[in-house]
Image: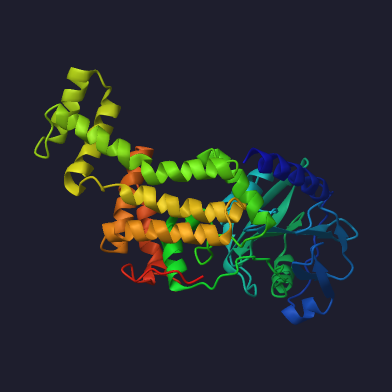
Amino acid sequence: MITKHFRLQALILCLIVFCAIPFLQGCGGGVKTPEEYLSNMKEFSTPDKTASIYLNQEWSEEDLQMDCWLGAGSKKGDKAVVLMQFPKTGANQLADSMNAVTELVETSYQISGKTDTEAPSIPDMSGVAASTCKMSAGGVTGDAYLVYGETDYAYYALSYIADKMSDGDIASFKASCSKFHEEAPEVEDNFASEMTDTIRWFNASYAILTDLNNWDYNLFGGLPANDDSAAIVQQLLPEWWDVTDRASADETMEWILSEGHRTGFVEDAQTLESFGVTAETATDDIVSMLISDYGLDEEDAKSYAKAYGMYAEFGPDAISGWDYCRAMNLLGYYYTAGYYSEQEALDKSLEVAQTMQPLFESWDGLIDSYLRGYEYWADGDSEERRTLYEELKTRDDNPYAIDFKMGLEKTW
């Protein structure tokens, strides 16, 4: 989002000021054990105390104007370390993926000559990768050892910067990383109901989008219910749904349940049938007719022909799963944003779930319909979402392990 972009650029400028110091030759020294390096270190923490590592005890901290970022350097100005934490949710969410963090760091500091290298072992951090490179900041170029990784709470970028990187510098920083510690803040969650199978069924119906948002499909609505989450969803709803309050939330829910995209989909198919199109009509013939007889351009003609193919094969409910899954998703949003109470959102979710469940025989059937609807709406393919659905089914917390045909009942 634009607001996050400018906020992040301001923080980057602060970091450049810190890093743009006249780097001097780093000290090499003989081969040391991690314990020997650590014996001359002390713990340095981010201002909010959510993350820490050990660094040379003679170093001084620098203010990076971000509570979850740590900067420290030697008194001589010959070495510096920066730890950047990017919480995955909440008001401090500045990046939504590890790729976004990597792109941010490597474009902001004009990274060049990047070479993958051995990564340090960092406690409780997954996906750890490291590289050596040249880093430019404020007109000064130095060597850097970059480390990326993530925890359940945040994405991380850690860098050790020196004029000329030695093996000893890297070994020292690996020792520092071995003492990484995260103290993730306790997240307030005001959702009071027990997470029963019925509510997990609700969550599964829109788990694909929840995961695409990097949210948690084990939570109703995908986020813990608190003020930070409310602010996030209140910003999202106007952009995607033109929902700004309770009245517009009700209006949108009424539209998607009574009409949605499935109504226009059926009307388009019936219009084509009034032109003489049948299930036996070849797709190319439909396209040619729409172009020659009705003046459509080729792209629109192909779109209508593709939609009719869905209708001919799967009937009037071919894309109903798209509308119903999005209605379930909206109800989670409405609760998180504070427009519906927990009771209201769950009651309405049960009503919608009991309407959609009989239309399909399995999760595969529902998701197939959802993906057809996505293709109809986006006028594109659904490969990314299809791949994600299949991947979700392999996870230890597979949201689709819940029996699709279970008896849905009020449990709250």
**Between 381 and 351, the one nearer to me in the picture:** 351
The x and y percentages for residue 401 are 38, 71
Q: Against 87, is 40 above or below?
A: below
The x and y percentages for residue 337 are 61, 51
Q: Against 280, is 135 above or below?
A: below
- Residue at 77%, 43% (x, y): give it: 13
Q: Is residue 260 left or right of residue 113?
A: left
Q: Is residue 228 left or right of residue 340?
A: right
Number of numbered discs visible in the structure rendering: 0
Coloration mode? rainbow
- Residue at 28%, 60% (x, y): give it: 358
**Between 3 and 261, the one nearer to me in the picture:** 261
Q: Is residue 306 left or right of residue 164?
A: left
Q: Is residue 95 visible?
A: no
The N terminus lies in quadrant: top right
- Residue at 33%, 52% (x, y): give it: 321
The x and y percentages for residue 313 are 17, 47
The x and y percentages for residue 91 are 69, 53
- Residue at 26%, 34% (x, y): give it: 267
Q: Is residue 324 visible?
A: yes
Q: Is residue 112 left or right of residue 349?
A: right
Q: Against 129, is 337 above or below?
A: above
